[in-house]
Image (cartoon, helix red, strand yellow):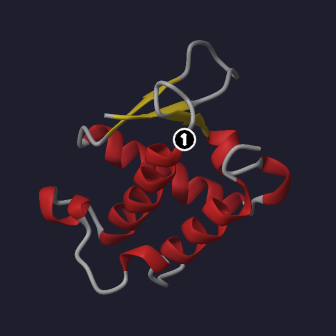
Amino acid sequence: EMLGKGARDELTDALQGREAPHTKGKQSKFGEETMHDEKAAQVGEVLRNYLDASSDNERGCTLDQLLPPSATDKAIAAMTFHAILTLATAGHVQVEQLEPFSPVRIFAA
């Protein structure tokens, strides 16, 4: 598990309407650049911080590393995935899945 409980907790806070700790007092870069909602912007900030800190050479992670299925509420996982797809559509992250049921990988754009 690369990202662990910290990412899961920050994403849960962002999706439940509580600001993630690192976004307090400043405007999200994602929110300034695009027209998507604030929840997607907050998820983007959390995701960007974890991708920047990633030891992976490609600055990527899998959805399962970000939100381990055994420890993540299904509603939070679905809302996070929706926000990630919104960010991908806006060009802020890249998402790939090489074949059905294989890991979903998320990369910094």
In the rendered image, residue 28, in percent from the top left (x then y), is placed at 26, 68
- Image quadrant containing the C terminus: top left
Up-down relation of residue 23 to residue 62 (above or below): below
In the rendered image, residue 58, in percent from the top left (x then y), is placed at 46, 25
For this view, does 4 lie left or right of residue 29? Answer: right
User: How many residues crowd mark 1 within 10 Å: few (<14), some (14–19), many (20+)?
Assistant: some
Seen at 43% across and 74% down, the residue is: 22
Up-down relation of residue 61 to residue 51 (above or below): above
Seen at 51% across and 33% down, the residue is: 60
For this view, does 11 lie left or right of residue 25? Answer: right
Give the total of numbered labels: 1
In the rendered image, residue 74, in percent from the top left (x then y), is placed at 72, 58
Seen at 16% across and 60% down, the residue is: 35
Q: Label 1 sits on what residue type?
A: Ser
**Which secondary structure lies at badge 1?**
loop
Outermost residue toward the right in this view: 70
Seen at 53% across and 48% down, the residue is: 81
Disc 1: which residue = 54
Occupied quadrant, residue 55: top right
For this view, does 91 lie left or right of residue 43? Answer: left
For this view, does 104 lie left or right of residue 18? Answer: right
